[in-house]
Amino acid sequence: MSITVSDVMGRTAIAVRQDAGFADIVAVMRRFAVGAVTVIDADRRPVGVVSQDDLLLKESDAVRHGIPVFESAARRREHEKAAAVVARDLMTSPAITVTPGTPARDAARLMHDKRIQQLPVIDPVTGRLAGILHRANLLRVFDRLEAELRAEAEAVALDLTATGSEVTIGIENGVVTLDGKVERHSQVVQIVQAIRRLEGVIDVTSRLEHGDDDLLVLPPLL
């Protein structure tokens, strides 16, 4: 079973309009105890995100009166945000979004790569804001029932081994342990990799024995 964003997302998203003022944004963040808010247009489509970091530039920016001529575009953008007073000028855009059908694993990778704490979830047809995905939501992937996880791991092992092979699967706190024997060394590698990709698996420990070492590379005869 593939876990998608719809399985773990929050159905209530905290959002502000593009003309929302600085003080209003701070008030919304404090009221709902969130570190970022989605900025939406008149049709409720996400156009950007304002985070606490964006707001804190108001205090941390060293240049409050004029911008030096020789500086990077990124630094110039920070100065502009520090001087901004409404969401459209404070936000980081475009908004990075996912849909309810996005695999949870892909969403987690996106958050890691972009170093972001939350993702607006949009309706794939209308593009409107449909919910929010926090990093904490994704941790629910690791709360799967042991019986459910074991069944998937056993199915993977059965699919990748030949008749006569015996693989015993143990699971404790999300860590899968493999015992038994298979025909070839390459099957051990394939089983471990496939089970490690299952949602909810934290790690895999293999004690599998094998017959043919089809991964052994022999040096050429001289």
Image: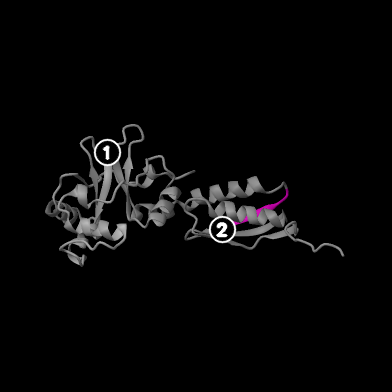
Query: Nearer the viewer's eye, disc 2 or disc 1?
Result: 1
Residue at mark 1: 45
Answer yes or no: is residue 193 visible: yes
Residue at image position (25%, 45%) is 13
Main SS of the magenta part reads: strand
Q: Is residue 188 left or right of residue 54?
A: right
State the residue lying farthest toward the right: 222
The x, y position of residue 77, in whole percent, is: 26, 56
Report helix, strand or loop for mark 2: strand
**Disc with the residue nearer the chain's start (2 vs 1):** 1
Task: Identify the image quadrant of residue 97.
Answer: top left
Extreme residue toward the top, this view: 125
Q: Position of residue 156 (x, y in %)?
A: 60, 48
Magenta span: 164-169
Badge 1: few (under 14), some or many (20 or more) residues near its Cα, within 10 Å?
Answer: some
Asked if the residue at tag 1 contacts the one at tag 2, i.e. Cβ–Cβ closer than 8 Å, the answer is: no
User: Considering depth in this image, is 208 or 213 the residue closer to the camera?
Assistant: 213
Q: Position of residue 189 (x, y in %)?
A: 64, 56
| Residue occupying image coordinates x 21% and y 56% | 80
The residue that disc 2 covers is 170
Amino acid bearing label 2: Gly
Amino acid at the residue labelled 1: Arg
